[in-house]
Image (tube, coloured by chain):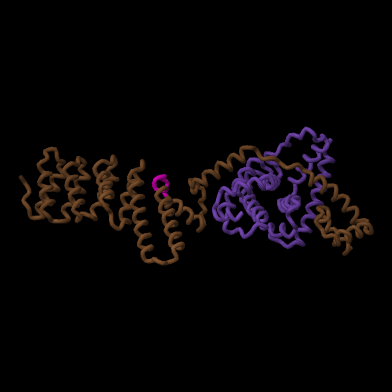
Amino acid sequence: MMKSSHVLNQLPEYLRGSVSEADRSAIERHLKACKSCKAEYTALANVWTEFSRLPDERPSPRMRQRFYAELERRKSGRALHSAPEIQSSGRLRNLLGRLWPKQPAMQFGIALVCLLVGYVIGFRIDGGGKNSGGDVAQLRSEVVNMQRLVMLSLLKTESASERIRGANWTERIVRPDTEVFSALFETVNYDPVVNVRLAALDALAKYYDETEVKKGIISSLLHQTSPLIQLALIQVITTVHDSEGIAALKELLKNKDLNKTVRGQVEKRLKEMGTEGIH
Amino acid sequence: MLQVRDGDVAKLGILFERHHVKLYNFLVRMTNRRDSSEDLVQEVFLRILKYGHSYRGDAEFVVWMFQLARNAANDHFRKWKKEMPLEDAGDMPDQEPAPDDSLMHHEKSALLTKALALLSAEKREVLVLSRYQELKYEEIGTILNCPVGTVKARVHRALKDLRREYHKLSQDKP
């Protein structure tokens, strides 16, 4: 009985043919000797054979299509929404997904930065540290240059939010140059979306003490028609008490079509600055 | 496989091609529903992608995949328990017989499929898993989270039950 039950539990594996050679011959010897095990074996073998011959079910072609469609979505990084039970890795991936820019111009910019960083690092390794200080400086300047390019390309994208990002990107540029400033002024003066213009103006405001920026802002004030932008420009101009700014505000008041609120604001500011600006 | 772990979704396609039929069949046998099984296969592969980091090496992949499939099937059961009694064989009409199949064999397969559906989920899963030659009993033990001895005993009992149900069904048939 003990022997018999021992073999019975081994029968499924034996039927699968997945027992060792030694076990197999032991089981076969036992089956010859034990009638009840032999009977059990014969019955199980029948079902097993039938069972292992069960044809595989074929999934519909739709399943494959759905799978590959989903895979495509994941590849382009758009399907990160379908995971409500996000684990920490999912959260990290979500974060990366959000940070990773969707705009080709931005992606191109980042690719350029990576390429350049790789190139400079490779160059450094190759150069063997003969001039490592110089190389680091060069690397730094190249990165700055790339950031500038990224910003400029962002400002030219179709999407308003990307252009706002482009304007904000200015903060990363250590020393913006004329090209950066003129791109920002172009945005302040001509961008169709007020919010983008305001973001560009914000970026410029930090450099108001630069002569070319000051000149640009003052000239922009006299040509703007949007009250919102005018108010923002006035805000920037009046942070510094200087004659150029005051002259520009007085000039603005000559405009007969000037928005009432704007006019009121200009007069108030001029008074605060101790200047009688009315007429 | 390492590429999937590193998030390269394209490599998931290779795994899909290699394993989806097996996985689908496991799920069809477990849920008795073809439509849900297709959804579940998709779900399992997305989980493979999502939890790729918890996967440790190539030999363990199939084991891990079936563990995920088992969890997915359990989730499915929890969701559908009330709506679909297990005895109701879901949306499982007989598949068209292959042209070269003898009618006899087709009938036998259909009966056996029915008999299998009548077993408890525990017995069904151990039988379906043991059908795949590539899975060792140790690996089935890992999938089911039980010792090898238990797997052996369970397969044996399940096979006996299958035989009994099959026998009953063939007796009932006119």
Tell whether B4 sits left or right of A94: right
Label the purple chain with its letter.
B
Q: Is residue A228 visible?
A: yes
Q: Nearer the viewer, residue B147 or A128?
A: A128
Q: Is residue A273 magenta?
A: no
Label the brown chain with its letter.
A
Image mark count: 0
Tell whether A69 sits left or right of A10: left
Q: Position of residue A189 (x, y in %)?
A: 24, 43
Q: Nearer the viewer, residue B100 or A148?
A: A148
Q: Position of residue B173 (x, y in %)?
A: 82, 37
Which residue is painted at 45% across and 59% down in the image?
Answer: A122
Tell whether B127 sits left or right of B6: right
User: Which range of residues does the magenta coloring cover?
Assistant: A101-107
The quadrant of the image that shows the N terminus of chain A is bottom right
Which residue is painted at 19% across and 45% down in the image?
Answer: A220
Q: Is residue B40 visible?
A: no
